[in-house]
Image: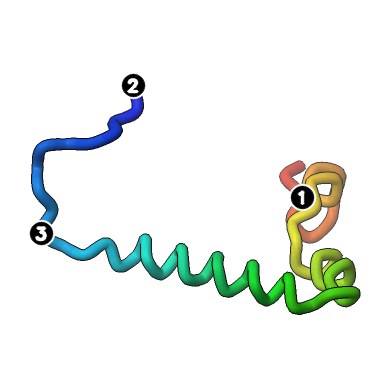
Amino acid sequence: MIPIRDTIPSNRLPVVNYLLVAANLGLFFYEISLGENLPPFLERYAVIPDRLLRGGALSVR
């Protein structure tokens, strides 16, 4: 089962979670702002499964 809630109160602020959400939102809005330049951006920086599995700099084989 996946825990939905607990009864133990937290004393700390989830800073890492907030930073991850902020980074994802920032990148999302950056990608939206790219417009026609989005495909070259994704070609350069995205992990493409075919390249990952069939050879290349990050090959798992």
Left or right of 24 on screen, residue 8: left
**How far is disc 2 from disc 1 in space, using C-alphas?**
34 Å
Residue 11: assigned label: 3
Write down the residue under mark 1: 59
Query: Looking at the picture, does residue 1 appear above or below residue 40?
Result: above
The residue lying at 81 percent from left, 65 percent from top is 42
How would you rate the neighbour count of disc 1 (Cα within 10 Å): few for under 14, some for 14-19, many for 20 or more?
few
**Residue 18: x %, y % from top left:** 37, 66
- Look at the image and tell me in which quarter the C terminus lies: top right
Which amino acid, mark 3? Answer: Asn
For the residue marked with disc 2, what is the amino acid?
A: Met
Element carrying mark 2: loop
Which residue appears at 87% of the width and 76% of the height?
A: 37
> Callout 3: few (<14), some (14-19), or many (20+) C-alpha neighbours within 10 Å?
few
Disc 2: which residue: 1
Image coordinates for residue 47, horizontal then vertical, percent: 74, 56
* Marks 2 and 3, the one that precedes in the sequence: 2
Query: Residue 33 falls in which quadrant of the image?
Result: bottom right
Question: Which residue shows up at 68% across the image and 76% down it?
Answer: 30
